[in-house]
Image: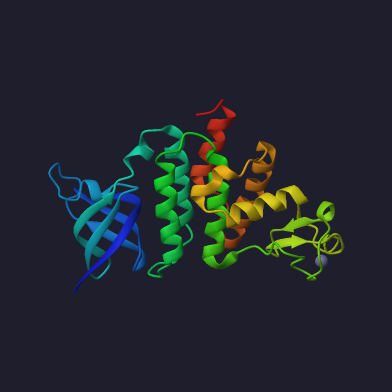
Amino acid sequence: MLVKSEGIVLRETKFEETDKILNIFSLKYGKIHAIARGALRPRSPFIASSQVFSYSEYTFYKGKNFYHISQGDILDSFYDIREDMNRLLYGTYLLELIDSSIVEEEPNEKLFKLLIKALSILSNMDDDFLKFVISFEIKYISFLGFRPFLDNCVMCGKDVINDKLRFSIKQGGIICENCSNLEKTSRYMDGAMLKYLKLLLYTSLDNLDEIKMPKDVMIKLQDILVQYILTCIEKDHFNSLNFIKSIEKNGGA
Ligand SMILES: [Zn+2]
């Protein structure tokens, strides 16, 4: 039976002589493994629609082990992401976040739309990458069902005092001074960081210009968020993020 869905290629792997196996995040079927037969042949009709970042309307049929792509019509190749080192680095990280966390064949429309929107914004982006990435991360983890509790103490429910709060990765939210004595692994957070974190959660990715925030706050927030995400999705690192960090250490991209 032929089925159709929009999808975006998260990862491609060469398979046999001329085929590719693609990890596709599809709107209707969630993450699927799909084989593009002959995609590595020079005149293959799948050349464009089988590249990482390609956003296409796919026609599949389901085989024994894989979905098989019978047609792929490009909606957006996000070619401009490949034209700039920072766009490519951060774009690769966004795809890794999605690829390493979503469950196979479980659709997530909100997350799908977030990814498409993020990639189109990233295509035209020249600076402020970190703010954009943090805003993506907090939305992403919320759409996966792990939205952190940011209103009052996640452990006792009491209001938190701005300069005496912490963030508990284990409990998934802010905690008050009292509870921080019980939760020793919690991380430093202050009122300003919390304010920006909420802003980044609730502001749409295309309105981030409205938020002016200090660089050191971004770095601290991202550090907490990445740890939180890794804990939620039970991973210990992201290859693409380690690569970005190693480049930054050596003087930037
Ligand atoms: Zn508390």
Look at 63% across and 53% down and name the residue there: 199
Left or right: 97 in relation to 60: right
Q: Is residue 53 above or below residue 99?
A: above
Left or right: 21 in relation to 197: left
Left or right: 194 in relation to 249: right
Left or right: 41 in relation to 252: left
Foreground residue, 176 or 34? 176
Q: Is residue 74 above or below residue 250?
A: below
Q: Is residue 62 visible?
A: no
* Picture quadrant of residue 63: bottom left
Look at 71% across and 48% down and name the residue there: 193
**Percent from the top left, x then y, of residue 56?**
27, 55
Q: Quadrant of ligand 1?
A: bottom right
**Percent from the top left, x then y, of residue 228?**
63, 56
Q: Is residue 199 visible?
A: yes
- Looking at this view, name the residue that lies furthest to the top: 251
* Picture quadrant of residue 106: bottom left
Look at 30% across and 61% down and name the residue there: 6
**Percent from the top left, x then y, of residue 165?**
80, 56
Q: Coloring scheme of the render?
A: rainbow
* Picture quadrant of residue 181: bottom right
**Percent from the top left, x then y, of residue 37?**
18, 55
Foreground residue, 203 or 72? 203
Q: Quadrant of the N terminus?
A: bottom left
